[in-house]
Amino acid sequence: FKKFLGSSTKSIVRSVDVPCLVIKSNTKVVDFRHILLPTDLSNDSKKHIDKMHSLFPTSRIELLHSYFVPFEGRLSFYGLEKGEAVLFQDNIREAALEQAYNFYNSLSIDTEKVNISVIHEGLYPEAFIQEADKLMCDLIALHTTGNFSFFAFDLLEHADKNILITRIDQT
């Protein structure tokens, strides 16, 4: 598989008008019960969530939003006392949670089949795969717009799970 994961594959995935499913497991039956979707809380993510729900209407969708604290390791270098740094980090976390839940509440699909998790982590394939395992997801679905454009292809190289990559038309 890695022989085909070059710029040609990336070009094909970015240019097709239909979702591309990369089967990485040896399963013969493709029946996805738990689907992990990273979200950057954008309109493109909403379109992607709607599309995945329409493709897999009986599946449970696990949304994952990751955030990070700017300059987290260097806050003291910028003159913040430890208490101020903790307060700053707490404020960032609370804002990320509020944005994620507002996004979740604005979805047009039945949220009985959707869960959202917020993690304090960057988008790294290894950490993301651990979250997918922890949530017992059997499919990872990503879109190739915004923050996930390059991450989708990094994840393809590292994940042993099935991956669905969708191009979202920006209109």
Image (tube, grey):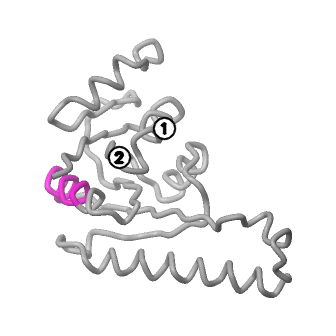
Q: How packed is label 1: few (under 14 Cα within 10 Å), some, or many (20 or more)? A: many
- Residue 54 shown left or right of residue 166 in the figure: left
Q: How packed is label 2: few (under 14 Cα within 10 Å), some, or many (20 or more)? A: many
**Mark 1, residue position:** 155
**Mark 2, residue position:** 142
Number of marks present in the image shown: 2
Q: In the image, what residue occupies the spot 37% across and 66% down?
A: 41
Amino acid, disc 1: Leu
Q: Are marks 2 and 1 in contact (CB under 8 Å)?
A: yes
Residue 52 in magenta?
Answer: yes
Give the extent of the magenta segment: 47-57
Residue 45 in magenta?
Answer: no
For the N terminus, which image quadrant? top left
Q: For the residue labelled by badge 2, is the local secondary structure a helix, a strand or a loop?
A: strand
Amino acid, disc 2: Leu
Q: Position of residue 156 (x, y in %)?
A: 45, 33
Q: For the residue labelled by badge 1, is the local secondary structure a helix, a strand or a loop?
A: helix
Q: Position of residue 53 (x, y in %)?
A: 20, 58
| Dot 2 or dot 1, earlier in sequence | 2
